[in-house]
Image (cartoon, coloured by chain):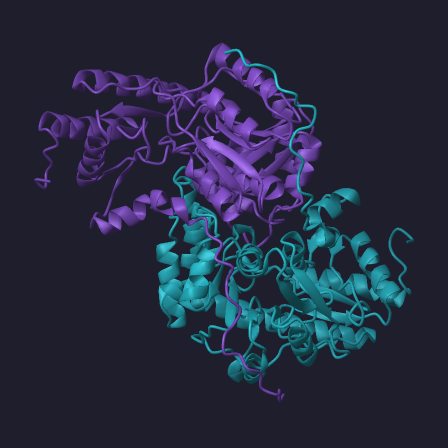
Chain colours: A purple, B cyan
Amino acid sequence: MVFEKGGVKSPMRPLGLTQGVAHAALVGPEELARGAGLETIVRLGSNESPFGPSPKAIAAMRAEAERANRYGDPSVSDLREAIAARHGVSPKNVSVGAGIDDLLGWIVRAYASNGGAAVAALGSFPTFEMHVTGFGTRLERVPYREDGHIDLEGFLDAARRLGGALIFLPNPDNPSGSMHPWHDVVAFLDALPDGSLLIHDEAYANFLEGDARFPRDAIDPRMIRLRTFSKEYGLAGARVGYALASPDAIAALDAVRLLYGVSRPAQAAALAALGDDEFVASVLTRIAEGRAEYHALGARLGLRTLPSATNFVLFDFGSAPRAKDALDALLRYRIHVRKPPFPPLDRYVRISVGMRSERTQLAAALDAIVGGTLHTPNGG
Amino acid sequence: MVFEKGGVKSPMRPLGLTQGVAHAALVGPEELARGAGLETIVRLGSNESPFGPSPKAIAAMRAEAERANRYGDPSVSDLREAIAARHGVSPKNVSVGAGIDDLLGWIVRAYASNGGAAVAALGSFPTFEMHVTGFGTRLERVPYREDGHIDLEGFLDAARRLGGALIFLPNPDNPSGSMHPWHDVVAFLDALPDGSLLIHDEAYANFLEGDARFPRDAIDPRMIRLRTFSKEYGLAGARVGYALASPDAIAALDAVRLLYGVSRPAQAAALAALGDDEFVASVLTRIAEGRAEYHALGARLGLRTLPSATNFVLFDFGSAPRAKDALDALLRYRIHVRKPPFPPLDRYVRISVGMRSERTQLAAALDAIVGGTLHTPNGG
């Protein structure tokens, strides 16, 4: 074939879109370990469950391995129906994505891309901010309250100033570990200005106990609720989460989702995980034990800890530089943790509840670090 | 907490974005089977490999199942390095996504969202069109040539009319099965107008034989090459594919990708699959056998078939209505196939190469359908 030559001196240039602001905050433990020349690393930085997936979910994934040549169901029907049944809602109230990260992208894109407005806490879960930045959405960031709570009054002021906004409320919150009771969420919804939509990110909601638990079937056109299989279900690596919302909102999200975005093993694993309540109950018990142990450890070391409704605890190192030093020192003990990036939470180090052996390692490391005024094995 | 009530009469409304145009074309076999009341269905409609993943990839996925509580490496370092080594390029030339579906979304978004221009074949792989529609990109659709080839001269005219465009060239092509040799791709690149970028989708490139194979290490700033583990590697359900491009293009894609978008089992499976060349070679041999069998079957039944450089074959039913009837009749024989939606290819039925038992089932069904002038077991 012969073509008359064109003049491609410069190919199409990218538009310069970037979610990059928060990328640095999300360097994975693999890359950190590599950088530090470590072969292994204790992962207490990503709020993973140390107790693995349910044996039923493991069996389901193993069985699916040899069927991985087949695309997963693009309608995610079986899993959507099981989720709907679990919540006492219709499958039309459910959309399944590759984790809350994925779902947040759909929401920002479907509702507020190219000039919409959003409100989030300063130093909130970085993926939301990445999507907001990437999709050209205006963001107002409201500082956390001194006690570690998201400032709902501040959120409301911002939403009113913006004349309605997409509001990102992780509840219980990451990275603070704090929570707002359901009746406050309802009051907050009632107070929002027209043109607002609440993203109620419930990644950690199953860690709430007794009366504090959220209603399983609350559907409200002013709100999209998000859930994940990455925490107590132990399926972070499989990538699966879901949105609970009005049929209209679900339709808006489905219109921008990737059809084959939820892998076949993930669909099977999540379905099996939903069928093993006993396992999840045992995980929640063990996480609660570990959390209590962390509070006791903090008390013993003279490090204040914040109350936590999640699977991680914030330890107060008194100042941001000291918290950063502790982070670096823990890495030299081969322990990966993270810290909130902005005041007033930047003096805390966030530590995920690990399994017993990991907690013992952590306690020994913190003993040495705090006892030795941040003396570390490498003399750092 | 008490809030002064707002006036939420109407919550934020979605922007009305939709990729929906092509959704109907992508109803999965699960939903079709459900709709037809079938418990099982022979999947010859999605160009999956019937030969499964490599035993090494299966073993890797099984081993990862119990580690699914850990997030996958957000940098996808090990897999990126293995891919780069395989192609003789730098890891900076590689970005890994959750299949080509995912990568196409990044490209459209990063280069041509909100007013950019794109060129594709009329009736091309629908995911590209979905992204183009969803991201507000202007699309020119160029009909296929009568012989089933993408019309490169038509693409060039369109790109020139548009003053540069994102050009989607699956090569070998789906759904036609046709291909353009590498020297034509290079001539096409040289003829493109400024401001163009070629998406060279090489999903089926490994099915090319001998001298027809594309250079493994060609990197060109005017082109993004796409590869997948969904075909000969047998990992469609795991969701993993990659882009090969200039470091600048890779950076533009990385800036909009989902950090944890490639699941942990998928990363492990793809890495293991790359290490089993023997298995892939045997798959390619078996696919070639099945393809030859399909051409012989067509000849025996008096159905012309198009040459195919892929793992599927187009059977000519003479007219679009007859092709649609054959599709429906095959579903009544519990066999799922698909057909191109637009002329001149809409008189063909696209049938993926199945395993031997599936091909026997298909031959029996086509015998009955074509022999009986589309008589079917249910009298349809």
Number of numbered discs overlaid on the protein picture: 0
* Residue at 48%, 21% in the rendered image: A152
Do we see residue B209 in this rendering?
Answer: yes
B18 in relation to A7, above or below? above
Q: Quadrant of residue B321?
A: bottom right
A341 in relation to B215, above or below? above
Left or right, B117 with respect to B253, comes to right
Residue that lies at the very extreme toward the front in this rendered image:
A161
Q: Quadrant of the C terminus of chain B?
A: bottom right
x and y percent of residue B304 in the render?
A: 79, 76
Q: Nearer the viewer, residue A151 or A66?
A: A151
x and y percent of residue A31 in the render?
A: 30, 49
Q: Nearer the viewer, residue A165 or A211?
A: A165
Left or right, B133 with respect to A165, comes to right
x and y percent of residue A240 in the render?
A: 52, 39
Do we see residue A215 in this rendering?
Answer: no
x and y percent of residue A39 in the render?
A: 23, 48
A13 in relation to B31, above or below? below
Q: Quadrant of residue A271?
A: top right
Q: Nearer the viewer, residue A204 or B37?
A: A204
Q: Nearer the viewer, residue A42 or A317?
A: A317
